[in-house]
Amino acid sequence: MQSTRPTLLGVRVPRIEDDRLVTGRGRYVADVVLPGVVEAAFVRSELPHAQVVRVDASAALDSPGVHAAFRGSDLDVHAVADPMPWVRPVHHFPLARDRVRYVGRPLAVVVADDRYLAEDAAELVDVDLEPLPTVDTVEAALSADAPLLYPEWRDNLLLSLAPENKAVDEAFERLRVVSGTYTTHRHAAVPLEPRGVLAEYRDGRLTVWTSTQAAFLTRSMLASVLGLPERDIRVITPDVGGGFGQKNEIYPEDYVIPWLAMRLHRPVRWIEDRHEHLISACHARDMRIDLSAAVRDDGTIAALRGRIRTDLGSGEMFPGGFGPSMVAVGSLCGPYRIPHQCVAVQGVVTNKTPLGAYRGFGMPEGTFAIERLVDKIGRELDIDPLELRRRMIIGPHELPYETAAGARLDSGSHRRAFDRAVEIGEELLASERERAEPGAHLGVGYATYIEGVAASAFSITGSWSGQDSADLRFDADGGVTVAVGISAMGQGAHTMVATLVAEELALPMEQVRVVMGDTDIAPFGLGSWASRSTIVAGGAIAQAAEVLRRKGTEIAAHLLEAAPEDLELTGGGFQVRGSPGSSVPWERVARVALTRTFDLPPGVEPGLDARASYEPPGMDHQPRPDGKMNASASYTNATHAAVVKVYPTTGVVQVVRYAVVHDCGRIINPQTVAGQIHGGVAQGIGGTLYEQLPYDEGQPLATTFMDYVLPTACEIPDIDTEELCSPAPETAFGVKGAGEAGIIGPPAAIVRAVEHALEPLGVADINTTPLTPSVVRQLIEEARS
């Protein structure tokens, strides 16, 4: 049924959650107050690799205000599951029992009246660790005489995939080869709100408040490790102050705090401090891509061959940190017409904090590698790199197009976005040149890519696929409560859900109440990650709303004494087509369905609610026989343009202008999409120029914000965004996703811009990030020598 009301889609609707959040009325885990709550502090390993000889907490128990102290062997829990047969089992427990493999690994936990007393007592826990040889680089971990983190493996490879492709071999035998190695260093998500867990065990049920992106996945893992039925666990996510993938992991503390609540029979809370966050919350990136291209005479690529090696840290993380490597493989072809690829993957364990998810999830790394290689091909063959890209970018007449990795691009504006971004970039560069200052070098760089959205979770969890659900329930006054399985973490999810429900039912948005992040109230869903929320929640909402429209139409037709096919949706209800005076509002329809049931049409049951589960079509959960895999429901595309100013004497790089031409299908709320792009670009600038987590013999060297450098508002330039809308043909509303597009392009675009700026000094082929001042000065010195 069509609505005559103007659409809400594409309108800059004010976000309904923002007023509460920006005025300080948000409610985070640290704000949840329960009677009798006590606080926990963890004792963490100060050694990167050691055998646990003894952990003695007796002195801590005598400390003032202490209620309990436990070691790893005290916890009667199961090991964290390793359900993925394609990776080696790690078999780790929430608290270390026999061995520690990174600085920050939890060894014991102390519970006291408050955090201060708990931390004082934690310092009294006597820990005896026998040091073991340390490996903190991939090269050291793969050497023949390397110390083994898991002796039963006989090497340090958590994951090793070595595909074969005869078409690739043939192309490399007959064509010119251009190769490069591209490194993205380790950094972290550092959301504004660190992690936090609060648990209470009452009347045989466990309730857990936690800052997570996936409440139902957390519930399932708690059930597995604690040995409880899922029905006896309730997971609530209050407001989440940023997640960025880092809160899509299940951590040791997530298991220990609920176990403590069950053991002590009182509420227990733990709130992570920033030092803990930087050494124990998952790290990200840390990927090296060796990539070669078989190149035709015109510079176009006939085949790619390579190897991705990722430093996974200790590997003690669920979901495992190997997932970004596999996504990077799928990202290497980008929007280019590259027929074949064959890329091996190695996930290597070292004595560092475990690797996990972070916004972009392998796509920034893969995009960085292919964009840098395309620039190198252009330089070696003396072809303008922009013209080379135009030769390879797929055009609209080629859609749908399957990439060499198996991604099915059914829509997009790949060539148009690229051309428009280049046009903007050249204009921005010319504008900056008009006010150029002496001693500064200007440059512009571009990055074009595709972003897989709403991906399957099966390849990284071995359990879950890609579905989500929605419940829509009318109240007797005509209002609607919608409960969804996705999560909110500042990305505007409440506004998106309310907009889609209001659109589908022709209701004012203020009549829609949104519920999410509570496993007792919301229907089953996999949460919010991989830019999936709009696609999966939208699909489920569209299906449930269709059920309500059909039933509402039947009731309204009965009340209006009209045929159902003669009705249409208007603002707030139904009317006979062409007769505005013959109408009935949703409020009356709901009242009849819920209270005045004697007014229902014959054969129509009371009630006005519907539940739907939705899984996007066409998505592969495992590789096909040919090794290809369409792991995402759809693919966003974009091109970034970065204009930088480089000061050769100091090595300082300043991003002065930035533009993104972006296509995420049909846009629900332009304001939200722009916010997602701007935030992602800011994080991308941080990872490209500032952020890194170095180690020395297993010891982390950036453990506070004194050492871990983040960009501030002063380092983020004006960001211009333009949207090109190519609706996805197989998703509800034609939507795709926009959560990660902003962070994918900056490494490749900014590095190329720096290279362009320094070309007069002989700098070429920059292949690593971050470009800190010392790195830039070294590049200049090497070029001069």
Image: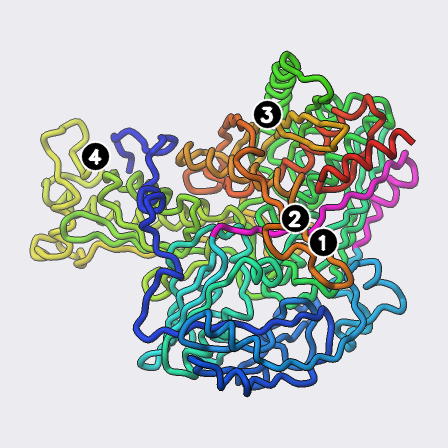
Q: Amino acid at mark 2?
A: Gly
**Is residue 336 rendered to the left or right of residue 515?**
right
- Calculate the distance from the C-alpha at mark 1 to the C-alpha at mark 3: 29 Å
Residue indicated by mark 2: 362
Residue range corresponding to the magenta coloring: 163-192
Q: Quadrant of the C terminus?
A: top right
Q: Amino acid at mark 3?
A: Arg
- Disc number placed over residue 694 in the picture, else none: 1
Q: Secondary structure at mark 4?
A: loop
Position of residue 380 measured from the top left corner of the image (x, y, whole percent): 87, 28
Q: Amino acid at mark 1?
A: Pro
Dot in front, 1 or 3: 1
Dot in front, 1 or 4: 1
N-terminal label among 1 and 3: 3
Q: Residues within 10 Å of mark 4 (few under 14, many from 20)?
A: some
Position of residue 220 measured from the top left corner of the image (x, y, whole percent): 48, 70
Q: Residues within 10 Å of mark 2 (few under 14, many from 20)?
A: many
Q: Is residue 712 above or below residue 356?
A: above
